[in-house]
């Protein structure tokens, strides 16, 4: 019988953290983070990582597991997540998988997309073009051959743009079409998924407030420290939302005020791409939140549905 897995998912800044802590406390659970950037040590503020106090309150897994100079893949995530879930359930506790990285959620629940192997010559040419033309030019090329994938992938996410273009180059088929194998109903766990959602105006207000708070908490100084480390940031870490813009600011790009506004804009776009992904989670139970909905109310509504 498949292991039971509870998931709490939603766009960035929707309110997952406090709700997940209260759910874990109510159901004697531990939390498995489903976030592609919270895996990195010392990337705390820009990833909205749970605080040390919150992590003492409830045990978390898959946070701070690799150095910022390391690459990290969805395959490695699934391996780590499977091990954590087995550990938690083996101790008789419940698991709540919590996050907003839709690709990781989908891989954890339904399995990895089995695409063609990497083409070194294609990747070398792709990276040359990124350096010469910028990532937006390659994102535009992706939009021309696979608009569905381009709608899900942030224009600065060169790693995923590279893979989508590579798959199209090697197979002649859009990666979004090949990934439809995920939509055949197979699942790796017995899942109960809850999707937190807000209307766009409320969501954007929360995003703007979070970006402001991150800078007040010291995001600029955090990025400076990361850039001073002896091992350079990995390509994936450098492209993290918020970090990429601050790195550009610190290396001769836009001034700080413009950088803050760019991060707000890019985060709102990212939330839009998350919403596109989440529409494919057809079995998720949607929990619509009003601006004044608190975490305790979220927990009460989810608990009622779990017991119903």
Image (cartoon, rainbow, N blue to C red):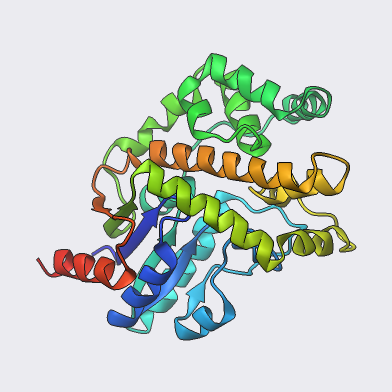
Against 276, is 68 above or below? below
Please name the residue shown 63% across and 61% down the image: 214
Whether residue 43 is visible here, answered yes or no, is: yes
The quadrant of the rendering that contains the N terminus is: bottom left
Question: Relative to 157, is 17 above or below?
Answer: below
Quadrant in the rendering for residue 193: bottom left
Q: Is residue 272 above or below residue 164?
A: below
Front residue of 85/8: it is 8
Q: Residue at x 69, y 21 (%)?
A: 137
Quarter assignment of residue 129? top right
- The answer to whether residue 28 shows anywhere in this view is no
Q: Residue at x 25, y 42 (%)?
A: 282
Left or right of residue 15: residue 195? left
Q: Between residues 272 and 211, which one lies in front from this camera angle? A: 211
295 relative position to 34: left or right: left
Residue 248, image x and y in percent?
A: 80, 43
């Amino acid at each position: 019988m498949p292991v039971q897995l509870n998931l709490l998912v939603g766009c960035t800044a929707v309110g997952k953290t406090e709700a997940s802590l209260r759910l874990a406390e109510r159901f004697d659970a531990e939390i498995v983070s489903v976030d592609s950037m919270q895996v990195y040590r010392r990337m705390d503020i820009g990833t909205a990582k749970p605080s040390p106090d919150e992590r003492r309150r409830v045990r978390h897994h898959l946070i701070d597991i690799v150095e910022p100079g390391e690459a990290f893949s969805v395959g490695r995530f699934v391996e780590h997540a499977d091990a954590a879930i087995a550990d938690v359930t083996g101790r008789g506790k419940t698991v709540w998988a919590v996050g907003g990285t839709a690709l990781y959620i989908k891989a954890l629940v339904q399995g990895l997309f089995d695409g063609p192997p990497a083409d070194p010559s294609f990747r070398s040419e792709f990276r040359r073009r990124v350096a010469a033309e910028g990532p937006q030019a390659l994102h535009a090329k992706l939009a021309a051959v696979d608009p569905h994938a381009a709608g899900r992938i942030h224009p600065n996410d060169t790693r995923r743009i590279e893979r989508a273009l590579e798959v199209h180059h090697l197979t002649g088929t859009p990666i979004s079409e090949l990934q439809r194998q995920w939509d055949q109903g197979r699942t790796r766990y017995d899942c109960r998924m809850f999707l937190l959602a807000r209307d766009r105006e409320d969501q954007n207000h929360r995003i703007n407030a979070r970006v402001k708070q991150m800078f007040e908490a010291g995001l600029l100084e955090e990025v400076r420290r990361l850039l001073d480390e002896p091992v350079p940031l990995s390509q994936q870490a450098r492209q993290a939302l918020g970090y990429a813009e601050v790195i550009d600011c610190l290396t001769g790009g836009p001034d700080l005020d413009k950088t803050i506004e760019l991060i707000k804009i890019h985060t709102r776009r990212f939330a839009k791409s998350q919403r596109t992904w989440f529409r494919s989670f057809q079995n998720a139970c949607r929990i619509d939140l009003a601006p004044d909905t608190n975490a305790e109310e979220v927990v009460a509504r989810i608990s009622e549905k779990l017991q119903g």
